Image: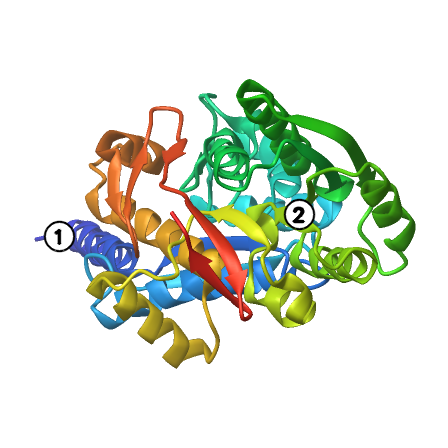
């Protein structure tokens, strides 16, 4: 064998070894999973609970060996409930080739980042975004939550038939208008179909300097059977306090956005009797849900609420998609192709547009706890 032939063979063997090592590294490299939500500010309770739910699912999967021997690396970003911040942090994840991003937790942030998501190879899988503006579209947005029309109709029916409500005065937050306007529109439609009427609707911008007393006075002056609040937990608690101060027996209903433990903590006794339709049965005694509840409490020393459960469910869907997808198949194709996923409490069905069909429950606050009515 000549020296030249020997060197050629040596180079080939070296390339094969390096190539094999690279392939082995790629096969064992962690799977990067993104998470984006408001982790600071007035909606932090929603984002933190959602992140915790995702983190719990990831930690459980990693403890079980990951996916095909690959651990999951959760990359968390705070969108600060600010559109420009959301665009920036989502852009960072896209540039890092994160294929699936769980989040955001509010509709306004989802609407802000969708143009850049649709121009990329990444997909957004939201735990809690419910706006109808993103429904029935073949885009890079998927969710584990029903659209507002589904649970708003249930709230309207309960208030009309069970509580005898015929007129409603509403107050809604324009800082999450993609959600709040969608919620109010769907409620008007469902309530009017029953024979009810929204007699007044006032908007506000959420902030530390927002004064609710004048707005509440206007709502109460309408003499409606019920006051409807469509806002985050902090603002909803402040509004409830103002309502109860002026008319203690006033009926109050609110959107599920506010139905975290932060609301009951801040509202205190003024939350008593508040009705809300939400996508968690807090009185569920099944082993699956009780195990989730026990593990979440043990890990984070707090209640998961609907946001913690929704974050956990989104992570379960994402991790399942990674484990079942076929060669050459995108995660979106894997999710839509499977259609049905087991969540922490119920079976989730996702249609060809990435929209979910999820059961909702009517609840009422009693002694600072959410109690499922139907």
* Pair 2/1: label in front: 2
Q: Is residue 345 shown above or below 57?
A: above
Q: Is residue 142 shown above or below 2?
A: above
Residue drawn at (33%, 27%) of the image: 351
Q: Quadrant of residue 269?
A: bottom right
Residue drawn at (62%, 47%) of the image: 254
Side (left or right) of 122 relative to 220:
left
Side (left or right) of 202 relative to 24:
right
Q: Which mark is residue 94?
A: none
Q: SS at mark 2?
A: helix
Residue drawn at (54%, 33%) of the image: 160
x then y, percent, for residue 356: 38, 35
- Mark 1 — residue? 2
Model colouring: rainbow
Side (left or right) of 168 relative to 246:
left
Q: SS at mark 1?
A: loop
Question: Badge 2: how crowded within 10 Å, few (<14), some, or many (20+)?
Answer: many
> Which is more toward the observer, 162 or 97?
162
Q: Is residue 148 visible to the viewer in this orientation of the structure?
A: yes
x then y, percent, for residue 275: 55, 50
Considering only order in the chain, which callout, 1 or 2, is on the residue closer to the N terminus? Answer: 1
Q: Is residue 119 visible to the viewer in this orientation of the structure?
A: no
Q: Residue furthest left?
A: 1
Q: Are marks 2 and 1 in contact (CB under 8 Å)?
A: no
- Mark 2 — residue? 86
Side (left or right) of 332 relative to 119:
left
Q: CA distance from mark 2 to mark 1?
A: 62 Å
């Amino acid at each position: 064998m000549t020296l030249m032939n020997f060197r050629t063979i040596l180079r080939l063997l070296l390339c094969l070894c390096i190539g094999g090592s690279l392939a082995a590294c790629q096969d064992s490299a962690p799977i990067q999973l993104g998470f984006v939500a408001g982790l600071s500010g007035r909606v932090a309770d929603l984002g933190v609970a959602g992140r915790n739910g995702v983190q719990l699912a990831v930690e459980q999967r990693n403890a079980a060996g990951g996916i095909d021997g690959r651990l999951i690396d959760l990359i968390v970003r705070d969108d600060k409930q600010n559109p420009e911040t959301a665009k920036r942090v989502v852009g960072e994840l896209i540039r890092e080739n994160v294929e699936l991003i769980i989040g955001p937790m509010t509709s306004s942030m989802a609407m802000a980042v969708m143009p850049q998501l649709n121009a990329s190879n990444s997909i957004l899988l939201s735990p809690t975004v419910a706006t109808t503006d993103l429904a029935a579209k073949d885009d890079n947005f998927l969710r584990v939550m029903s659209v507002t029309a589904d649970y708003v109709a249930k709230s309207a029916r309960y208030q009309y038939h069970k509580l005898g409500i015929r007129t409603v005065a509403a107050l809604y937050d324009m800082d999450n208008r993609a959600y709040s306007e969608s919620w109010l529109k769907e409620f008007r439609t469902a309530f009017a179909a029953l024979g009810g009427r929204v007699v007044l609707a006032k908007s506000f911008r959420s902030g530390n300097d927002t004064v609710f007393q004048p707005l509440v006075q206007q709502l109460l002056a309408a003499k409606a059977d019920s006051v409807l609040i469509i806002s985050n937990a902090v603002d909803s608690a402040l509004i409830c306090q103002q309502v109860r101060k002026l008319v203690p027996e006033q009926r109050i209903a609110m959107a599920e956005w506010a139905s975290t433990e932060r609301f009951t903590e801040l509202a205190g006794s003024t939350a008593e009797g508040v009705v809300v339709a939400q996508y968690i049965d807090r009185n569920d005694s099944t082993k699956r849900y009780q195990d989730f509840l026990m593990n979440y409490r043990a890990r984070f020393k707090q209640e998961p609420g609907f946001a913690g459960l929704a974050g956990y469910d989104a992570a379960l869907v994402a991790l399942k998609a990674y484990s079942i997808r076929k060669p050459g198949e995108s995660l979106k194709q894997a999710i839509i192709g499977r259609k049905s996923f087991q969540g922490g409490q119920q079976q989730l069905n996702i249609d060809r547009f990435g929209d979910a069909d999820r059961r909702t429950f009517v609840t009422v606050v009693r002694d600072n706890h959410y109690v499922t009515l139907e």
